[in-house]
Amino acid sequence: MTSTTTILSLPNELLLAIAAAGQHDHGTHTSVDSRSEWILSHLCRRFRHATLAAPALWTNISISLSISWKKLQDRQHYEEILSLYLRRSIPLKVSVSLRVVIFFMAGVVELFTKWLHQIAPDMERVRSLSIDLGLQADDLGLAFAPLRYLAAPNLVYLDITNHNTNTLYRCPFELCSLGTPKLSSVRLDGLLPFPIPSCDDAALLSSIVARPIALVDLRLDLTGVASSAPTDPQFRIASLQSLRIHINENYNQPHLAFILDLFDCPALTELAIAGSHGDQIFYLFQLPSVPRSTFPVLRSLSFIYEYAEGCSCREDTPLGSRIDDSNGMLLFPALSSLSLVGQCFTARLVKEILGAQALPWPHLKTLTVSPVNSISDVRKALQDAVQRSPQPIPKLRLGQALFFTEDWQDDRGHVEVFDPEEMLKPFRKSYAHGRS
């Protein structure tokens, strides 16, 4: 006589373990009908009682609404799902992901606002909030109103992406203005968190950094911030260790220095800037006096131009006097890794940093170089530096276009090839609203 084991014969403990394991396969915006906890709760009465008695199964809350009139009209269904997850997860902390990517369609703002009204009473339990939406600038203040005057005492991670490019010049809303003491990671894309002239209301970053927090990682899209914007006050984020920003690729040489001067981050160790140009880097290091910002413990500095076709700068443009290395050392005295990816004037920058006439950068251990244009000039500048420079040469990480084994046979211990995509990918992902 053989016995047959079915899912109905499994003990509740094993059943719940299977449901929890199945959650690891969920995508960020997996349909609720495909989620393991939802399926098991609808199979039979015993399974339903077991899953409903396990709050941990309901702590990852994800609601996704894409472009669909039918789904928009069925908004009550999504409100019910959100309410069920919030109720069933009590008393545990929750991660919330809301996605409403619908452009120019009536009712979207009201729908999103209703979701936030549902979340507001449970905001003290929210540890992660991820929002993906496409709203016009004038709608943002109304949409986020339910969370404006709240505290989020357990919020650790905040990620807001707005795919509507019309918001690039305004940010008229506050979020959790009563405090986020545990917030450690923030990413804002398609939003400007600075009080620039066209923004009359308190800005998001202002409200975030106004109170003591443990913010460690920050990613910002600053493509709408012009160099004519006011620089006071600086944004002092004493705990910040990693900063990634997008700047406008069309602005002049002083723009990079202006953007850096907006931040006072004494603990910053990693800084990556996308949208920069080689002439802006020259300007930064040629300043007769350093800006008010300094980065005393910054170890990794990356300048990135992320478009495959490269910029339209003419590389025979005069750049003025040579780089004053002492300014660079005052700005970044602990710098050990410098990356130049897709930058114009890379050959000139290499000569200024590593050439025979260059002053030594005492702590520089790694130089990463991957140009889009003037490949042969950059390779020659690197080889000349390796062969002729009296100063120690840092380890070179070169893009594939620069790396020919026969050119570097005697320097294999100091030269390696790398894929620039590893540095470009995070910026391409965060710049989802596209190139203006």
Image (cartoon, helix red, strand yellow):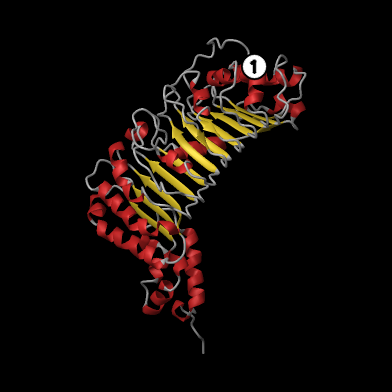
Query: Residue 180's spot in the image, x, y percent?
Result: 47, 49
Q: Quadrant of the C terminus?
A: top left
Query: Residue 417's spot in the image, x, y percent?
Result: 65, 33
How many numbered marks are there?
A: 1
Q: What residue is shown at x 42% (from left), y 28% (from top)? A: 225
Q: Which residue is mark 1?
A: 324
Q: Residues within 10 Å of mark 1 (few under 14, many from 20)?
A: some
131 left or right, relative to 347: left
Label 1 element class: loop
Amino acid of disc 1: Asp
Above-or-below relation of 34 to 279: below
From the viewer's side, name the closer residue of 266 and 343. 266
Query: Residue 151's spot in the image, x, y percent?
Result: 42, 52
Above-or-below relation of 153 to 302: below
| Residue 211 seen in render | yes
Above-or-below relation of 368 to 345: below
11 left or right, relative to 84: right
Q: What residue is shown at x 29% (from left), y 54% (from top)? A: 114
From the viewer's side, name the closer residue of 90 and 195. 195
From the viewer's side, name the closer residue of 170 and 318. 170
Query: Residue 155's spot in the image, x, y percent?
Result: 47, 52
